[in-house]
Amino acid sequence: MKKKFVFSALLLLIFFGVSKAQLTVHKLVHVGYVYQKQSFAEVGGRLLFLQNDDVIYRLDVAGLMGSANGKFAIMPKVQGDILFNFERNVDLYHSIYFLAGAEATTKYIAPKAGVTLFGLIDLTGGYAFSIDKEGINGKELKGVNFNFTINLPLVMLHDLLK
């Protein structure tokens, strides 16, 4: 319970701190695949903050769902990313952003790096450090991780459903 409160308070403080910086905020829904010693499906919401398109900040909250040691499991996840691309006046190259960030669950913390295409398709990897030796269903989640995510802007979804 204490960990959930700390994650929630940290996310709230970051959100209010960034919102005063006069940034444009876009809402996204994302789905993806996470490999962290087990395969997990990821579903969540994401906020994208930008002032210009050279540096973009993202915060998200998601749920990881999968099977660990033969039992179904769900884990909450909080993530923060910085996307950057400093190419100027080159539209095609500006579609690829480099990504650096970190994700935290109740079982592990993982710094990560990767690339994203137009901010819509992410491919990242990192290394997870276990914060709970019991892990999930008796399996400790530490080591190399891999993420593939598709981000869907709510504006686009709204227009498609009209």
Image (cartoon, grey):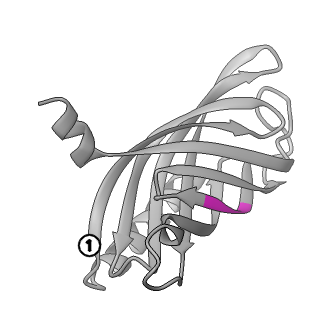
| Place of residue 46 in the rendered image (x, y in percent of width and height, measured from the top left) | 41, 53
| Place of residue 30 in the rendered image (x, y in percent of width and height, measured from the top left) | 45, 42
Residue that badge 1 annotates: 24
Q: Which residue is painted at 35% across and 49% down in the image? A: 28
Q: Main secondary structure of the magenta part?
A: strand
Dividing the picture into quadrants, the one containing residue 102 is bottom right
Magenta span has 69? no
Question: What's the amino acid at mark 1?
Answer: Thr
| Place of residue 106 in the rendered image (x, y in percent of width and height, measured from the top left) | 66, 47
In the rendered image, the quadrant that contains the C terminus is top left
Q: Which residue is painted at 46% across and 51% down in the image? A: 120
Q: Which residue is painted at 49% across and 64% down in the image? A: 95
Quick one: 150 or 92, which is closer to the camera?
92
The vertical placement of 159 against 41, above or below, is below
**Magenta residue span:** 111-115
Dividing the picture into quadrants, the one containing residue 42 is top right
Q: Is residue 34 visible?
A: yes
Number of numbered tags placed on the structure image: 1
| Place of residue 20 in the rendered image (x, y in percent of width and height, measured from the top left) | 27, 83
Q: Is residue 74 visible?
A: no
Which residue is the extreme one toward the left?
A: 162
